[in-house]
Image (cartoon, helix red, strand yellow):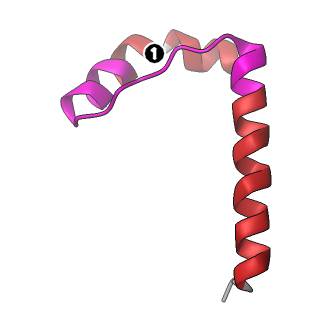
Amino acid sequence: MRREIRASLPELKERFEKSGGEPWDLPDDKLDAFVASEYENWTKLIREAGIKLD
């Protein structure tokens, strides 16, 4: 999946920048750590806030 995503990065990067975004190009290990950290943080916030999916 990463290979396919990386193959489409030039087009995605251009679209993202045109919409005001600032793309990151992280090595796989740093991206994995970032995603895991975000998952943990958002899971904790959702649980503490008692948010439920309708």
Residue in the image at 70% along x and 32% along y = 34
In the displayed image of the protein, which residue is found farthest to the left? 18
- Number of residue marks: 1
Q: Which residue is mark 1?
A: 9
Residue in the image at 78% along x and 16% along y = 29
Residue 17 position in % (x across, y down): 26, 26
Verify whether residue 23 appears in magenta: yes
Question: Could you tell me if residue 52 is visible in this image?
Answer: no
Residue in the image at 71% along x and 68% along y = 45
Residue in the image at 74% along x and 86% along y = 50
Residue 31 position in % (x across, y down): 69, 24
Question: Against 50, is 5 above or below?
Answer: above
Q: Is residue 53 left or right of residue 44?
A: left
Verify whether residue 26 appears in magenta: yes
> Which sits in the foreground, 45 or 19?
45
Which stretch did the figure color magenta?
13-32
Label 1's element?
A: helix
Q: Is residue 32 left or right of residue 24?
A: right
In the rendered image, which quarter contains the N terminus? Answer: top right
Residue 41 position in % (x across, y down): 73, 55
